[in-house]
Amino acid sequence: MKFKSNDDVTGLTVAVVGLGYVGLPTALALSDAGATVVGVDSSPARLRAIARGAVDLLPLHHAQLACASAGDGFRLTSDPTAVGAADAVVICVPTPVDARREPDLTALSAACASVVEHAVPGQLIVLTSTSYVGTTRDLLVEPLRARGLVVDEDVYVAFAPERIDPGNERHTPERTPRLVGGAGPHSTRAAAALLAPTASLIRTVADPETAEMAKLWENTYRAVNIALANELADACHVLGLAPVPVIEAAATKPYGFMPFYPGPGVGGHCIPCDPHYLLWQLGRVRQQAPVVATALAANTARPGRITERALEQLARSAVPARGARVLLIGVAYKEGVADVRESPALEILAGLAAAGADVAYCDPLVPTIGVGASLLQHVPDPHTRPWDLVVLHTVHPVHDLTWLCAADAPSVLDTRQRGALAMAGAAAGTGAAAGSGVTAAAGATTRAGTTSGTGSTSGTGLTAGGRAEQETEVEGKAEVTAEAEVTA
């Protein structure tokens, strides 16, 4: 197999194993770069959804999917033997945690075993799924060696952790740097050459273990800082301060600080899961990580604390929890996506329902969700029904909150404290919510648009959502820090 240059994968056939939120954008990026792509997924339902275009993607990726599906160079299959005809195989399967917060390697182990079984000489195998340090060697390098295939001579193996930010058009794969750690110099160069057209920059590292740990470090860093942001937001409440203006003030420092914001908890596949792979591995060698462990415990407890605050707010309004009409705005774990995996909203709804509340939600991206034994449906017109409490969980761009700015609006609990109601009031021409009190998740009750967790972005160099504009977009093809031609 020969990778011709950093930016040319034309003529190569690439099998992408696992077509979820990581695998599908990866497959589309490779197809867009000129490779012939075979998408392999064990779920016929997922394959049918992709064929129909009924998948959660950015508009850019929907356009890529339509273009790829119309041509001859993009094929979908559930046949695992299809990887045997590929020049390269990219493994993108989920690595969740179980009920005990320990790694669930079922899907990853099965995918790697299947790829190893059908591997052929000259093939490149790239693992992208986040896992413990040593996974690439345990599940690919050693099993291939047991088959008589010498890695970095007969076959090539690398770990290149995924960096997918669902719903964020600023951080598409093509605009995001990528790490590559091969099980030898030839493997590193081959993987870098394959992925270069799909990233803004390729940074090669010494080995798979370095890349594996780098991915765990990235997401553990985020988990710890999210827990810290929530804790300091609670401290601000005790001191009579709104946290967001404090964060925005601190974010004016151009070095040594990155803003993290309070919220209802962590969701999605990465932050609630990945750091537990590190804790699990460290626990096996009796190495403690108390800061990480405490942060993860705090993040796990956060939805329960939000539930308590919702019940406290109902009590302050003299509304009994039993029979209280409570609406959650948004149940996805982040704005702009339909993903409810590990979403704090699920626990919040379940907790409120257990307290006797009549719960409902408004999320046009999520038609139905299960809460306990009940199946809830999205409420499309929440302004037409009376509510005792509205909880702002995830405000999508499509959400219209102007009805919450009316004089007779229900009580609101803002779990993210990012000024969603203030912006809705400005859009409606009211300037601020004139109705009932808005309570920030930290507990300070004020009118929307004032300094109680809604904040202002004026004069701070921040976007309307309050995030610091720290990233610099890189256009064009990736630079590669190693030679990109491998002949086998």
Image (cartoon, helix red, strand yellow):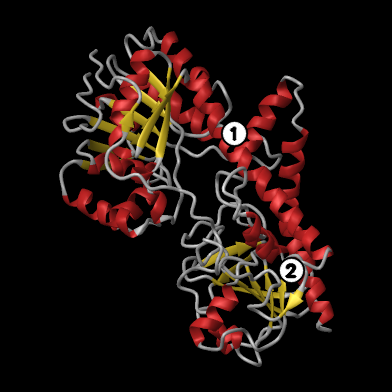
The residue nearer to you, when weighing 293 against 353, is 293
Residue 28 % position (x, y):
29, 45
Q: Residue at x 63, y 37 (%)?
A: 275
Residue that sits furthest to the bottom in the current view: 407
Tell me the quadrant of the picture where the C terminus can be found: top left
The residue nearer to you, when weighing 414 against 131, is 414
Q: Residue at x 63, y 62 (%)?
A: 345
Packing grade of label 2 (10 A; few <14, some 14-19, many >=20) is many
Residue 436 % position (x, y):
71, 86
Q: Is residue 156 left or right of residue 348?
A: left
> Earlier along the polypeptide chain: callout 2 or callout 1?
1
Residue 25 % position (x, y):
35, 46
Q: CA distance from mark 2 to mark 1?
A: 35 Å
The residue nearer to you, when weighing 229 against 314, is 229
Residue 81: tell me if it is visible: no
Secondary structure beneath dot 2 equals helix
Residue 417: tell me if it is visible: yes
The residue nearer to you, when weighing 346 against 427, is 427
- Which image quarter: residue 98? top right
Q: Is residue 329 left or right of residue 204?
A: right
Tell me the quadrant of the picture where the N terminus can be found: top left
Q: Given this view, does label 2 or label 1 mark the residue nearer the observer?
A: 1
Query: Which residue corresponds to mark 2?
Result: 352
